[in-house]
Image: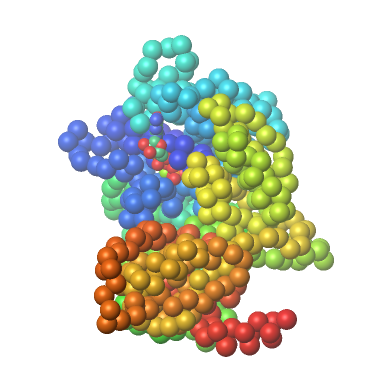
Amino acid sequence: MQKIRNIAVIAHVDHGKTTLVDGLLEQSGTFGDHEAHDERAMDSNDIEKERGITILSKNTAIRYDGYKINIIDTPGHADFGGEVERVLKMVDGVLVLVDAYEGVMPQTKFVVKKMLALGIKPIVVINKIDKDSAEPDRVVDEMFDLFADMGATDEQQDFPIIYAAARNGIAKMDMADEDGDFTCIFDAIINDVPEPQGDASNPLQAQVFTLDYDNYVGKIGISRIFNGTVSKGDNIMLAKSNGEMVKGKISKLIGFLGLNRMEIDQAEAGDIVAFAGMETVDVGDTVADPVNPVALDPMHIEEPTLTVVFAVNDSPLAGKEGKHVTSNKLRERLEFEMRTNVAMKLEIVGEGKFKVSGRGELQITVLAENMRREDFEFSISRPEVIVKEIEGVKCEPFEHLVIDVPEDLSGGVIERLGKRKAEMKSMLPMGQGFQRIEFEIPARALIGFRGQFLTDTKGEGVMNNSFIEFRPYSGGVESRSYGALVSMVAGSTLAFSLFSIQNRGVLYIGVQTEVYEGMIVGEHSRDNDLVVNPIKGKAQSNVRSSGADEAIKLIPPRDMSLERALEWIEDDELLEVTPKSIRIRKKHLTEAERKRHSRKGK
Ligand SMILES: Nc1nc2c(ncn2[C@@H]2O[C@H](COP(=O)(O)OP(=O)(O)OP(=O)(O)O)[C@@H](O)[C@H]2O)c(=O)[nH]1
Ligand SMILES: [Mg+2]
């Protein structure tokens, strides 16, 4: 049997997981000397590269000192937290990273809690010790406190600590030591992570934890083999989580090494491999012995907390920029997404209307962003949190929110959060004039808060949030405090009219932009909506005014990214998403219709 270690790398967003994996690939010699690779090589898809964050957990393997080490890099953003939980069941140890300045953050708590519950003893890596602001001792204390608070066993509390500057390939066991390379990390993985249990001579049991799709071989299930041996061409039984048994055959067996996948002939207990050939495979299924199939414990999949409605674009500009615009196309694409993305759910709610549920706005934005790149065009409604009944009580998702704000601005932010039903839990000075304040807040109240927070803190504030649990519904919360500037006409915008409209608020569009009646061109500085005419030119007159056309100075429009726009819109508004544009509109395009509907609403 080969010597194997299986680990996951977990942490809060941006604490350096993928960078550390680069170093493990590099320093184990898995990347050949001249093999070119990008920074954060595991962040392989376009959106991951552009945003510099990990969205999907991915596995790789390295060889070190006669061992095969399977490594799963996980996403740190809270919206993708469900992935982490599944991954943790597949490994025997973890590297939990924590930024040597930022310390314990909401998602650190989330992943540590899940890890402790599974009985895993981690290796703690205090990363980014090269930062000027680093305070590794404080952060180590924070980690001990966290483990104690979360009920770690004595053995779990007794975790090894490694200090690292992952980006520079540096690690050491003691801050006082000279900088070393990752040898101490490899040694800790080999010595402190338990070897996989299970027996290669038992009947086969492998559990699928991630799905992939390949145009040639179809659905691929990435799995950990807990027992038995599997070979290419084997007949197997797929034990589904609902108890169903489906016969199947392994058409391809795929192994991992570095950034490569290769076909292999055989794999055995302890290893992580991918299977092709089973079209009905889902996350959590057990690939089992055909004669003696025994399912492994089903996998808990985190429920969605947020929904939006994707719909056919019916704006006056519909169909001009996208290629796939019909209800059928939209449905096919969304159904395809659900085949591999277990964290999301789809429900058809009306003609050309699809309710998509997920863990957060980023998760939904990433789907929408992928679809625009594939030439889809559609509309999205305002995100709504999922409210459900638990033991007869109406409940909604709550989040743990941590903000770092300049001290002099904290009062204003606290007041604003108070109106949004946030409960303050702690407040600590962070040095450099910053305060760290922690809250618990209904997820509903966080929708639209980020943009406001950035404005209130002049872009200096940092906020992080992570799902806690469903709690009793907390009643009305304050939402957007400003109205919309709504176009009353269709046409192309002109500087002359934008110049006067910009006095009424903040513009979202510039000159020579195509608009239509009911399209939103900016944010009003007051709480009501205002209809405006952005296409009006200067009245022509025969008399030339002295000084002629004074140069018109337009303030650059606010750039509304997909996320920002999604956060901003209210119930009576929609986002129009096309490969080229993101437009914000009223659901009802004419003022008369809007009046009629608001009266009906009351
Ligand atoms: N100063 C410093 N920066 C680092 C270090 N390690 C990583 N970074 C930087 O931190 C940022 C985030 O690194 P990633 O490796 O993407 O972090 P991550 O934990 O994988 O992030 P997510 O997957 O999105 O949760 C990048 O800009 C890295 O270059 C380090 O040791 N020191
Ligand atoms: Mg990453």
Could you say which quadrant of the image residue 190 lies in?
Answer: top left
Name the residue: 53% across, 32% down.
102
Above/below status of 239 relative to 18: below
Q: Is residue 547 above or below residue 134?
A: below
Considering every residue shown, the one lying at the far left of the view is 34
Residue 321 lies, in percent from the top left, at 31, 77
Mark yes or no: residue 181 visible. Answer: yes
Horizontal side of residue 300 vs 378, given as left or right: right
**On the rendering, which quadrant does ligand 1 occupy?**
top left
Spot occupied by residue 355 in the image (x, y as percentages of width and height): 55, 74
The residue at 67%/44% (across/down) is 414
Q: Nearer the viewer, residue 43 or 534?
A: 534
Residue at 43 percent of width and 83 percent of height: 489
Q: Between residues 434 and 400, which one lies in front from this camera angle?
A: 434
Colouring method of the image: rainbow
User: Does 126 appear above or below 584?
Assistant: above
Residue at 56% from the left image edge and 53% from the top image edge: 452
Q: Quadrant of residue 410?
A: top right
